Image (cartoon, rainbow, N blue to C red):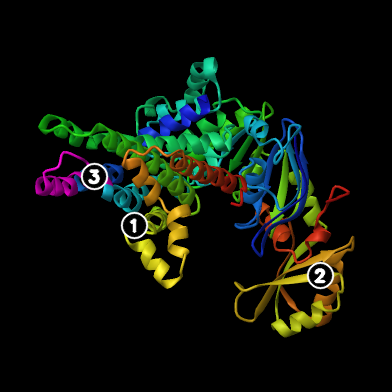
Amino acid sequence: MRDIAIIFKREFQSYFFSPIAYVFSIIFIFLNTSIYMFHFFLLRNADMRSFFSTLPLVLGVIFIPAISMRLWSEEKKLGTIELILTLPTKTEHIVLGKYLAGYAFYLIALAGTLTIPIILVILGKPDFGPMMGGYLGAILLGGFFMSIGIFISSFFSDQIVSLIITSLVCGFLTLIGWQYVPMLIDGWIPGLGTFLDKYIGVSRHFNDIERGVLDIKSIIYFLSFTILFLFLNVKILERRKY
Amino acid sequence: MIEFNNISKNYGLTKALTDVSFSVKKGEIIGFVGPNGAGKTTAMKIITTYTAPSAGTATVGKYDVQKNPLEVRNLIGYLPESVPLYDEMLVSEYLEFIGNARHLNGKLKKRFDWVVQACGLETMLNRKIGFLSKGFRQRTCLAQALIHDPEVLILDEPTSGLDPIQIISIRNMIKELAHEKTIILSTHILPEVSNISDRILVINKGKLVADGTFQELIQQVSKHSSIYLAVKTSKKDFENGIRNIPEIKDITFDHATKRGVTGAHLYYSGKIDMIKKLNEIIQNYKWEVIEFHPEKLSLENTFIRLTQSHEPEKQAETGGKKL
């Protein structure tokens, strides 16, 4: 536990020296709140549905890849991976420390959007269930995407390549369950769209939680895939094929 | 302290190390010598547990590098060739991070103070690593390798890119640590190894081609003694004459001779009076001698003869032992 905390502290502090992380945090908060405000003034509803409907795409395609890309790629580029992997620290502790640092940074950025529910409480009487469900979904979804991001970054020393690949993978996982996309895929290959949406895509599970339906299956989906990618990350590093 | 048993390492189809075996006793300083790309760094990475070997076993202390990597890492301090550091951190923050990660706990303050003083970092503690000069980066990286007082030090090109004063300072530091710790240092700066090391391992194209003290290596190479001869004649005539002495194994022509003069380093083996034999040839062919003397192999020549040999297996015999 102490080893995880040591790695976490170093990694988390380094985010505050990274201008890219700041820039993307601002873009994340600005993009989400501006998309939301557009719908808010148009529809005049005191809920956050429109905010959470675009969140998976913004998270998966832009924000999480931008903050996860450095986790291993930078260590590889600087060569510091050679020192960190020869410390007397278990690989799983290093992976967890780094993962939690990226995740904590995401949670801070997510906390930056709490201004929206505060405004809603001041201006109207919002239903707290879906709002809390939406934030819980965002917490779980962010954790899942972050585990994909850290896993992918362990393959590349170029941060931009890590960003693009993570963006493609997370974008794919989001889009296969996005609105009419499953039906479109079913039209090409019958049954494939429904299968991908039901078992692999994130949208269905996120939407369930976001609506306030706390289905244990969705929670298990997010947690199990998060653990799987962290486990794979440890295994990739332990192959020690450098 | 360190055992390397039939280690091979492949990167795809490239063989970085082939069946390398050696052992290092406690307190020994070993110089790892070889041209760039010979496999020195790969061997060091295997000892530090960073890279897994494709075949063979390696142990540090009594621990296997693959089965007990954490125990091995506790014993080792490692200075990689690229001097990798986190540029955004202060020197003090970085050393504290490494000290904590190496579980120094209550000893951290004492070890921190020692390492800062030993590496001459007192004035740099509050400076960002990214703003340090090459010399101070090297010292900071050396400090992280020493902070936990490791039994084994692995130093990959510790003086590369430093100015002469910095080289002397790092070299003195290694000398101070000598015999207290087991040290493996790789370099292609030859005076460095002959000055510091108890033993030299010469590695070339992934194979260990020699293992011995500096004197032993010179003796090994000197089995193929060398004479320099420059005479006024054509190259063809020179070759015809030399061909009469079968003991001459190799000829390296000197291209810096004057026009009409042919000069060459003549390498021969066996205990024969080569000067007498050459004198006979010179008289028979009526050559006018410009230069004629036996050669003492320099450090650089020893290195070149060891690493450029086409028959490494034959040269691998040192002090009566076969590698």
Query: Could you tell me if residue B89 is visible in this image?
Result: no
Closer to the camera in the image, B155 or B254: B155
The residue to which callout 1 is attached is A178
Query: Could you tell me if residue B262 is visible in this image?
Result: yes
Which element type, helix, strand or loop, lies under badge 1? Answer: loop
Would you place residue B319 above or below residue A11 in this image?
below
To the question of a shared chain for discs 2 and 3, the answer is no
Q: In the figure, is residue A148 to the left or right of A21?
A: right
Q: Is residue A40 magenta?
A: yes
- Identity, as a three-letter code, of the amino acid under mark 1: Trp
Closer to the camera in the image, A201 or B320: A201
Q: Report the residue that reaches farthest toward the top.
A: B106
- As drawn, the label of residue A226 is none
The residue to which callout 2 is attached is B249
Could you say which quadrant of the image residue A165 lies in? bottom left
Cα distance between the residues tagged 2 and 1: 77 Å
Answer few, some or many: residues within 10 Å of disc 1's Cα (few below 14, many 20 plus, some between 14 and 19): some
